[in-house]
Structure formats: structure tokens, C-alpha cells
Amino acid sequence: MSTCVAQRVSVIERSGQPPRLTLTEGQPCRRAAPPPGAFTDSAAALGITFVYPAFPPEFPGGRLMDFPAVAIVDLDGDGALDLFFSNSGGRDQLYLTGGRGPAAFLRSDRTGSGEWGPSRAVAAADLDGDGDRDLVIASNFDELIVAVNRGDGTFPDESAIELGPWVGGLSFSNFSVALGDVDGDGWLDLLVGNQTERVGEEGTGLPGREWLFRGQGTVFEDVSGWLPQRPFDDLTFLASLIDLDGDGDLDVHEINDARPLSDFGVDVARHPGVEPAQGDRLYENRGPREDGRVTFTDVTAASGSGVVIAGMGGSFGDYDNDGLPDVYVTAMPSDSNALLHNEGKLRFTDRTVAMSANTLTPAHDVGWGAMFFDADLDGWLDLFVVHGFKEGSNSASRKNRDDQSNVLLRNVQGTRFEDVTDAAGLHSGAWSRTPVVGDLNRDGFPDLVVGNTDTAPFVYLNGCDDRPWLTVRLVHLPPNTDGIQARVQATVGDVTQSRWLLAGGDGLYGSSAPEAYFGFPAGTERVVVTVRWPDGLEETWSDLPTRRLATLRR
């Protein structure tokens, strides 16, 4: 366990009515730490003993349950980041810091009103505006669990969202949950990505419709009809809420496994306009009408974002520092992963080859989650891509390698990516699925946690040194106190870095810390930070010192 080191905190009040600014010094580098961008798997050293079971006994016949979701978020309210691990074969597990200081974890049995079933995906954010982070969990094929935090990492108030009418035994396969305020009323809404839906125990599975719920605290109203409807939906792995066109409202992006509809017994010749294989989707948010209903328009074809590949997971990030979030999509063979550059006005161009961003090779031939983050804090977003495959308990059925390594691509100042996996200490052979990012030890350098199937997670502590950094955490007006969907920008000279605070819908199955991490050139002592808050207000702090955790309050 790490030892808590006292931190100096300064609170600055400014004249007029600007937000309050709190500055906290980071923890010193841990002893013998490598340089930034080099990682040490520290799960055992931190007391993380959780192991995700790939073949739980509840699912007979050797059925693979590969949904090792992870959330990094402060659940006990002490300012340090905690860890939540999903479990398809038993109880989910929490590791809380509980006032012991950063990266000082103690396993906690979740205290709640009941048990939820096998869990697939998680998103974490303050739903009811009380300042505590709550959880939304895709628990099994049939329901979502809304777990309300008491403030100390216990969840005495849990409720279920049942997905649809049960006449005929309709069931769903939900792989993604994302939170964000789509209608601008201040409350976080919920988008649920659905791979398949089946009618009856022996019914035929079809690509599943997505679900959109309008939030009013911890109560959600089904408004899925706001989304465009099609004769046949998509095999969605990752459904996301993010402002892709910079107009201040949240668009819907889907990463879909583009299997031919003929695999499901659909004769597309009998359905004019239906694609044989349906790729990714992009729905533009055109704002609420007078009756409050939000208009979403399918702009997939015109946008160039509808790649038709066996999409699994992906991430959003501004890899070239032009102020717009780009899109990365992972895939399965014989497809390529895809890097889509955001040209503005919801137009995207494929830059995969030009940026050397495809990680699918004979050595790692199946992509899962991915994450944009600045691993070495040089001011350019790197790209971590998760690999590893397992088809079932019968080794004779395997078609893909199961000894695949995850991959870290270093961003060379927006000109290309280069593979630095070995130098970063990230070479692995696990069946990895879920990457999430957060500064666990509060030294200013973002750490990486990877949810693995049938083994322990990787808890990678980043290296550190004396280079300038800044972490930004927001406190917004209730109810969205975490400032989910805010854009945070840091400027030094003529370079501006941009981050977007998301709750789920980034990576695959999991939820990263709702914080923004920045690194700067040597010698940088002061930076300019601009925040566009979820309600549209834009504010600038022109003289923030580096090597601090800056908490900005609306």
C-alpha cells in the first residue's frame, strides 16, 4: 500500500462572480519510478485481488462471458479515485481509498438493497445532484441497475430499469451505457447500446435497437423514439454521447459489428434501402423542440463516419490538437481498425494508413477497447488499443490467437503513430477487453487500468518525472455536478489541447475518471485553461500554475 503524503491546497476567490479555483499539489513521484509513458503493473502491490471469471458456473456449457467492465471514479468522496470491477460470475467488487490517500485501496463489499445479476457495462456520474457519483450498470440481458451512492461508496438505494415489454419473452444483450444531458435540462440522460434482441427462449436473435432514457435524477423515462428508427437495427458494441460538431449538444455515435443481415435470416432484397451489412452510425443532435422532444438526424452517409467493419470498441480524442474530437474504431479480421479525422461540421476522413494507426496484425488480430490519452504527457494524445481473443472453453474451436498483446501507439506530434508497447512495459498476453484511465496515485501522470477476461486486471501505474502537468477537475452546478460533457482546453503558446469529460461510452464496457490530464513542454510554469461548461457558458483562467490538480467550480 502507498502512504498518504500531505498535500498543500490553496483556494483562490476572484472578484466579481467567476468560479472558485482550488489548487492542490500533486504527490511526489514514487520511488524508482520509470519515466512517463513507461508503466508498471501494480495490481498485486496495491492489493487488487479481484479475478474476472470467463466461464462462470451460472452459464453451463462453457459459455464465455467476456465483459470485464471497469470504472475509475471517486465513490467515497475523499478526493482520491476508487476502482469498480464488474463480475459476470458473482459479486461486483469495489476497491475504495476511504481517506487513506491516493492508491491506498481496501476491498469493500458493496452494501445495497439487493443483488444485481451478471454485469456487462458501467457508467459513473452524479445522477441526483448531491455531489456523489452514482452507478448505472448493465446487469444482464434484461435490465439496468441504477445504484445511488450514499456518499461513502455504499449503495443502499438501487432500482431496475426493465427494457421493454416482456410479452413473448423479449430479451436484450446490452454492451454499453453512456450518460450525458442530451436535451439541455441539466439532468443526465442515459444511452444504452444493444447488440441483439431475441423473442422467446428459442427465438431468433436480431440486431438490437438502442435505448435512450430521459433522466430526472435517478428516474428515467424511455424516449427511445427520439432516435431514428430503421427496419433492422445494428449489432452495437459501443454507443456514445459526445459533441462531435462543437455546437454544445450531444450527438449519438454507434460502433457496430457489421455482420451481414443474411446471417440472421434477413433477405435484404425484400427491404429496399437496407444495407446488407450495417456499419457505424452517427446521429446529429439538432436540439429540443417546443414540446421538449430532441430531434436526432441520421447523418451517417454524409459524414463519412459510417465505416462498415466488424467494429468492437473505440475512443474519442483530438489527436492533432485542432480542437475537434477524432474517432478511433477497433475491429476484427479481416477488417482494419479505423482512425477518422474530424474535419468539422460532422465530416470525417479516414486517416488510418496515413497515421499508421492500424494495430491488427498476425500478432494481434482482434481489437476490443481503445483509449486516447497522453501516456507520456508530451502534449499529444497517444492511443492504447486492447487485444486478446477467446472463443470458448474448447481449445479446438479457436480460430484466432489467444496470446495477443495490447498495443500502445505513441503520437509523434500529430504526424503519425509509432508502436512503443515494449518500451512502455505494456506487452501482455491476457484476453483484455476494457481500458480506462485515471490518475490513481495523484502524481499528475495518468494511469491505466485494463479489465481482463479470466484473470486479474492490469493496474498500470504510469512513470513520472519533473515535467510540467496539469489535472483539471470540474464542479458544475447541480444536478450535473461532475460537468459531464464539458470541454476543457489548455493552451501554451500556439498549441491548444482539448479534452471532453465523458461518463461511459468511451473504450469498451467501462468508465474513465471524469478529469482532464495535460502535459506541457519543459519550462512551462503557467497555462491558460478554457472550460465550456455543459450549460454553454465558456470561461477562461489565464494564469494557472502547472504541477497542480486544479478544481474549477461553476
Image (cartoon, helix red, strand yellow):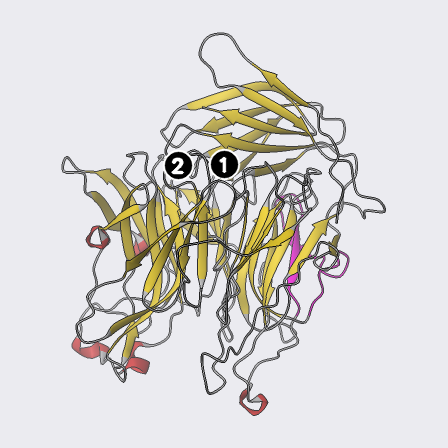
- Taking the view exactly as shown, the residue that stands out farthest to the right is 32
At x 52%, y 79%, the residue is 55
- What secondary structure do most residues of the magenta stretch adopt? loop
Determine which quarter of the picture holds residue 400: bottom right
- The answer to whether 548 is drawn above or below residue 4 in the figure is above
Mark 2 or mark 1: which comes first in sequence? Answer: 2
Front in this rendered view, residue 195 or 333: 195
Visible residue check, residue 291: yes
Q: Position of residue 531 (x, y in %)?
A: 48, 28
Front in this rendered view, residue 37 or 440: 440
> Mark 2 is on which residue type?
Gly
427 within the magenta span: yes
Label 2 neighbour load within 10 Å: few <14, some 14-19, many 20+? some
* Residues at marks 2 and 1, CA–CA distance in whole angstroms: 9 Å
> Mark 1 is on which residue type?
Gly
Q: Which residue is mark 2?
A: 246
Q: Which residue is mark 1?
A: 323
